[in-house]
Amino acid sequence: MDDAGTVIAFWVLSAATISSAAATAAVRNLIHAVVLLVVSFMGVAGLYITLSADFVAVTQILIYAGAISVLMVFAIVLTPRGERGNAEGFLRLPALLLAGLVAVTLIFVAVDTEWVISDRPGFQETASVIGEALLDRYVLPFEIASVLLLVAMLGAIVLVRPDSAMEDE
Amino acid sequence: MTEWYDFRDIGNAVGALLDQIRDWGAPDWVPYVAATLIGIVGILLWAVLSVLAFIWIERRVVGLMQNRIGPNRVGPQGLLQPVADAIKLLLKEAITTTNADRYMFWLGPILVFIPTIVVFAPIPFGEEMVLADLNVGVLFLIAIASINTLAVFIAGWSSNNKYALLGAMRTIAMLISYEIIQVLALLGVVLFVGSMRLGDIIGWQLDHDVWLIVLQPVAVLCYIIAGAVEMNRSPMDIAEAESEIVAGYHTEYGGIKFGFFYQAEYLAGFAITAVVVTLYLGGYTLFGLEQWVPGWLIFLGKLYGFFFTYIWFRGTLPRLRIDQLMAFAWKFLLPISILNVLLVGSEVLLWKEAGLESQLAIPLFAVINGAFAVAVVVGWATALGHSAPRHTAHRAILTQEVGAIFYGEAAPRP
């Protein structure tokens, strides 16, 4: 956060991220909302780049912009009888209230905390460091996460199997 | 320090220019921006010219392979055909259909086109000819390619046409399935080299005097096939199967908007071949020849040569059905690429832990992996019941039964 380029990039990316996130909630068309959400994801990836977290940034693009967005598209398109529009829900006001409270809390924490800046220089290459940390110190959460994903996948397969396939066995 | 006129690496000339700009006392960001602009303009120019050239080459070559002539009317030997096509596409009206989603319809071609250009950023055309020398280069390639999926959906969905939507869904299903195989194929290389920077991967191949294609035959096979899917070419072009869903997700696009899709398909092809050349075929190096011949010429030679293989595929192989294509990804390529990663992982572990000499290790692993490639491909195909073709027809079966091909009237049944 010292040179002008990083500062400009930070503000531009933040503005793009927040405005597209707001637009995601505001637009009526759900597919438009997904596209705007992807813009928001890309903005976050850009913010990671300004922090020199290149591995996290690229992973953000790969997972969120590439995979999660397609998952949402499939969810929207393949839901039978689902409205393609962003319907007026009765939870509108409570949701707004809750989001506002979360925002206030986050801003309060961000302003109130005394952030400590470490003396340690940044990593030259983050990928190998993250890899070693994941498979060494944090191997248990890492494995639990992968088992969780596997269970979710198996569950999805069981849910979408036609009933006749079950009876055949 | 090399001189600026050392044309073996155009990076030298650009570097000298940037030094000159610094000497003039420009602020720090000027050379940075200038280098980026030069890189972008250079890549764009190269890409557009190569696409124009290859439109002609491909049409002529496929014509030869299919025993016809191909375009030969515009200019000598039809050389100006791509130029005429480009002018035609530029001058045509870019129609937006009434029920299309206007903004998304406009966004589709652009979103499809941009990633195919951005992919070239981390690829080293020469030792210093890299636009962005990322240390997560390999992952970057996959990440940028994955954006394509959503772009294709936007294009297909916004057209408001059932063929376009079906084509888009097919393409998405195809891209998602083959993306996994692509990642697993590249993982083998990253495991061997221990770095995701493309320059390091080329350097590793140079240091060990070996191309990774020797150590990674299964991965190369998987990547080439997955690449053909990604660039949406025959035999994997089910996304625009004319007999089934018209032109797939770009059915409703015309004029320059269609031009973007066309260009993007070619550029994706160049990107895939560039990745294969960089990762598996030694990039801009050729066993010492790069000392004498410009590295970028070697790189481009390999790239065009390998792209020719894809043209060859297109001229030779018939299109797969969608269920065949998906089954091929999930039942055949995925298991063998996972086995490949397992094998490579244990080899690297053996190499590092047992402290093998690389003189010994590389030939040993090359032999093991070659044998593994043959065994796993043949073995898995046999296990799936594809051991031998069911029919060995010397003549077309119908002709054999009837005795001749009949035109016009109903053929007499034997």
Image (cartoon, coloured by chain):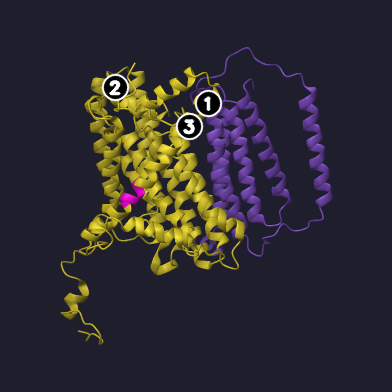
Chain colours: A purple, B yellow
* Mark 2 and mark 3: Cα distance apart in space: 29 Å
- Residue beneath label 3, please? B36
Q: Chain of mark 3?
A: B
User: What's the mark number on residue B30?
Assistant: 1
Q: Nearer the viewer, mark 3 or mark 1?
A: 1
Q: Is residue B82 located in the magenta-colored stretch of the structure?
A: no
- In the structure shown, which secondary structural element does the residue marked by tag 3 occupy? helix
Residue placed furthest toward the front? B24
Write down the region rendered in magenta. B50-54
Residues packed near mark 2 inside 10 Å, few (<14), some (14 to 19) or many (20 plus)? few
Please name whichever residue, A140 or B179, is drawn nearer the observer in this view of the structure: B179
The answer to whether marks 2 and 3 mark residues whose Cβ atoms lie closer than 8 Å is no
Q: Amino acid at mark 1?
A: Val
Which residue lies at the image location 45% right of the left edge and 58% below the top edge? B90
User: What's the mark number on residue B207?
Assistant: 2
- Residue A19: x, y in percent? 70, 42
Earlier in the chain: of badge 3 and badge 1, it is: 1
Q: Nearer the viewer, mark 2 or mark 3?
A: 3
Q: Chain of mark 2?
A: B
Q: Amino acid at mark 3?
A: Thr
